Amino acid sequence: MENQTSFVRSLCMGDIEENVIIPYPKLKDEEKEILRSVIDSVDATLKGRDAEFRKWDREGELPESMLEEMRQLGLFSLIIPEEHGGIGMNSTSYSRTLQALAKHDGSVAITAGAHSSIGMRGLVLFGTPEQKAKYAPKLATGEMIAAFCLTEPGAGSDAAALRTKAVKDGDDWIITGSKLWITNGGIADFFTVFAKTDTEGGQITAFIVTRDMKGVSTGPHEDKMGLRASSTTTVDMDQVRVPAANVLGDVGKGFKVAMKILNSGRTGLGGGSIGSMKSLIEMSTKQAKQRTQFDKPIAEFGLIKQKIGHMVVECYATEAVVNMVAGLVDQGYEDYAVEAAISKVFATECLWRTADEALQVAGGNGYMCEFPYERIVRNCRINRIFEGTNDILRLFIALTAMNDVGKQLKDVSKSVEGIFSDPIKGFGVMSEYAKKRLTSATGIGGAKKKFTKLNPALKDQAAIFEEATRDLAAAADRILRKHGKDIINKQFATKRLADIIIDLYVLGCVLSRVNTSIEDNGLEGAAKEIEILNVFAGQTRRRIKGNFGKIDDNDDDLITSLADHALEHEGFKWDNL
Ligand SMILES: Cc1cc2nc3c(=O)[nH]c(=O)nc-3n(C[C@H](O)[C@H](O)[C@H](O)COP(=O)(O)OP(=O)(O)OC[C@H]3O[C@@H](n4cnc5c(N)ncnc54)[C@H](O)[C@@H]3O)c2cc1C
């Protein structure tokens, strides 16, 4: 691998590592061919079945017949290597398949997605040859469906606080504990379970647990806001005897296994978000042309066009960032956790806005269960919560960036060595010395590189990016100077930095995508995409300036004070009675 640099992490130092994002990743012809045949079968099977999707949503269960159709379509085999009976898709093709599924129904998409994105991804990434030979063929046919079991009643965002125990007994482990809100829980036979071992320090370890093991049980289906037909249950383990051969990865390294699974699977959720957005844009445009008010189709009104235009820009940008991250994974980059987190936050928030605006375009019809809008709104709300809440991912994005800035301190005293190894906790002990040295040691505050590979027609948009890169480096510097070791407690500031990083990275991906389109289609052929880039670049420039300005000019203390007041009184204190 020629270049293993994380684009975003370099960006926070003021460096534009354009080789990482240019050219925009593309599928090979043979990959396209397989993908096309899978997507055609998905469309042929799921198209026109909205009444059934609605019924299953209302009833809160996906019928066994649908699961069987999914098995026949090979939807449980997508990422399993061919030698174990799977299709062996790479991340880009997998993400694109999830897109095709989500265009039709969220519950079907999440059932397939939870199986491959997280349920058995640990086996693909960390499984021994014996584990793969034993389980992968059954997972590929869907004879076994998989689930990922991390969350517990007391361990959500703070996953490391989990209490499920694994106690060594001879060669086996005895696992006891309860997992909460497990997608596919009720239909799965294969569970990737995270438990604390009784070894020194109580480290987390990942295990393969199967339903046929004595002591495994699952609770009733949860009655949920959305994705109602997808199975969500508790997974309970009472003294389950698990052979040592079922440990996934190394004993004590389970947290790393969990994070790697989540990072690697993020393009599935991103793909699903794109599929729903495309379907919403299709419905909204048709609806806007059909519905007449004030003697005109509502499509002719500026406020309707504004909504639809923004949906198009956000869908294009989401596809740019999700494909870029999938491409990084496929090219063998190891360091893509921040980029993957950005793609998850961006995709899920764009889908949320698109679903809300599409419902608005549909007016009262949008609120009626007869139409799919309300269902999509309900379905997509969870995307901002599961697989890491967007709030936690924002902290991760910004604190990793600042952690990197800290690491640049080549001549910092021994006293601060190692404190940056944990991006969230490390800043608690950052010394004043490190803080003072930060700017001079890293040289942040000025972009070290400019784009050289972009088409000259994109020079204005590239300039916006380069200027924003300087703003980002300056913002990281300013925030660290202002808050020093207290940065860990300054979440308002951290969120602003994360938002700048998110905007900037997505803009980089859009620039790259449009650049490739110009290469392939010429300036004229890419004209509409250049318009999208112009809108997105303008939006990001304004947002980044706004966030930058708010570092010093904000109402953070007042908002904190009002929140404290509400928390103290447990509610809203004023009433006009
Ligand atoms: C439908 C559904 C399916 C799911 N599927 C699975 C699954 O298959 N496997 C699995 O393991 N889990 C699954 N989950 C669990 C999901 O991953 C968690 O709900 C999620 O991680 C958040 O945890 P929590 O709900 O406990 O929220 P909490 O962690 O209690 O968070 C509550 C709020 O506080 C915020 N917050 C928490 N800590 C901080 C902080 N340090 N700083 C600022 N804000 C903070 C959060 O962002 C959030 O807004 C599922 C959940 C649902 C609802």
Image (tube, rainbow, N blue to C red):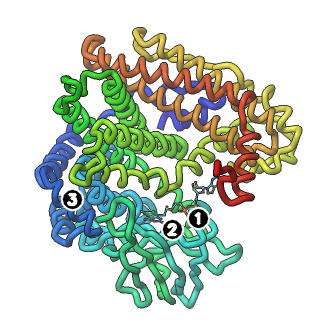
Depth check, front residue: 393 or 366: 366
Disc 3 CB within 8 Å of nearest ligand 1 atom = no
Q: Gap in Å between the C-alphas at discs 2 and 1?
A: 7 Å
Q: Quadrant of residue 125?
A: bottom left
Q: Quadrant of residue 252?
A: bottom right
Along the polypeptide, which appears first: circle 3 or circle 2? 3
Q: Gap in Å between the C-alphas at discs 3 and 1?
A: 33 Å
Category of crowding for the residue at label 2, using alpha-carbon neighbours closer than 10 angstroms: few (below 14), some (14–19), many (at least 20): many
Category of crowding for the residue at label 1, using alpha-carbon neighbours closer than 10 angstroms: few (below 14), some (14–19), many (at least 20): some
Cβ–Cβ under 8 Å for marks 3 and 1: no
Disc 2 CB within 8 Å of nearest ligand 1 atom = yes
Which residue type does callout 1 highlight? Ala
Q: Secondary structure at mark 2?
A: loop
Left or right of residue 330, residue 418 in this image: right
Which mark is on residue 150?
2
Disc 1 CB within 8 Å of nearest ligand 1 atom = yes
Q: Residue at x 51, y 79 (%)?
A: 178
Which mark is on residue 53?
3
Q: Secondary structure at mark 1?
A: helix
Q: How many marks?
A: 3
Which residue type does callout 2 highlight? Leu
Mark 1 — residue?
159
Q: Please, which residue is most extreme toward the front here? A: 577
Label 3 vs label 1, nearer the camera: 3
Q: Residue at x 26, y 59 (%)?
A: 108
Which residue type does callout 3 highlight? Phe
Q: Is residue 108 above or below residue 65?
A: above
The x, y position of residue 150, in whole percent, is 51, 68
Cβ–Cβ under 8 Å for marks 2 and 1: yes
- Would you say residue 332 is visible in this rendering? no
- Would you say residue 298 is visible in this rendering? yes
